[in-house]
Amino acid sequence: MTLLPVFPFSPPRSARSFQAAGGLAGLLSAAGGALAAHLPDPAFAPGGRTLAREAVQMGMWHALALLAVGVLLAQRGRRILLLLSGFGFGAGTVLFCGAVAWTGVTGVHLGPMAPIGGSTLMLAWLLLAVDAMRA
């Protein structure tokens, strides 16, 4: 039994969705980079500018990963591991980068959000690698 026939995304729609998510993540990362570079020091918690830059850098790398998943889906069609990888990149980027940026600005840690997001990103990379090996 396979999950593919009941999975709700068609290949063209899911490819476009991940490409759009990658574009939005890139936009937010570029905007965050501008803010991290130009806001005055009082806008950040102590050491927060460095955290904000790290969040921006990770966001931009994973924006590219989302774009890559969209391109691969367009080329290969619907593949469950590739879809799960894309969802992992999206969720992990929001959780990890959002929590790190929040900490950089406010100095308040959001509990386990950054580690959960980081773990989700690592799992997404693993799923992408396994999909590539199975192709």
Image (cartoon, rainbow, N blue to C red):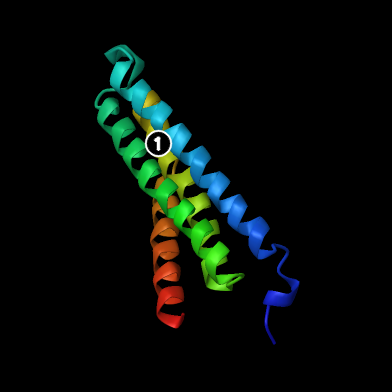
Quarter of the rendering containing residue 43 = top left
Residue found 39% across the figure and 71% down from its top: 129
- Nearer-the-camera pick, 123 or 76: 76
Q: Is residue 61 above or below residue 84?
A: above
Q: Position of residue 77 (x, y in %)?
A: 60, 70
Q: Amino acid at mark 1?
A: His
Question: According to the image, label 1 marks what residue?
Answer: 109
- Nearer-the-camera pick, 77 or 41: 77
**Tag 1 secondary structure:** loop
Q: Is residue 11 above or below residue 41?
A: below
Q: Label 1 crowding class (10 Å Cα cut-off): few <14, some 14-19, many 20+?
A: some
Q: Is residue 88 left or right of residue 10?
A: left
Q: Is residue 3 left or right of residue 125?
A: right
Q: Is residue 108 visible?
A: no
Q: Is residue 5 left or right of residue 43?
A: right
Residue found 38% across the figure and 38% down from its top: 100
Q: Is residue 12 above or below residue 106?
A: below
Quarter of the rendering containing residue 40 = top left
Quarter of the rendering containing residue 132 = bottom left
Residue found 52% across the figure and 67% down from its top: 82
Q: Position of residue 127 (x, y in %)?
A: 45, 70
Q: Is residue 19 visible?
A: yes
Q: Position of residue 9 (x, y in %)?
A: 69, 62
Direction front: furthest residue: 75
- Which part of the image, by quadrant, shows the N terminus? bottom right
Q: Position of residue 63 (x, y in %)?
A: 44, 46
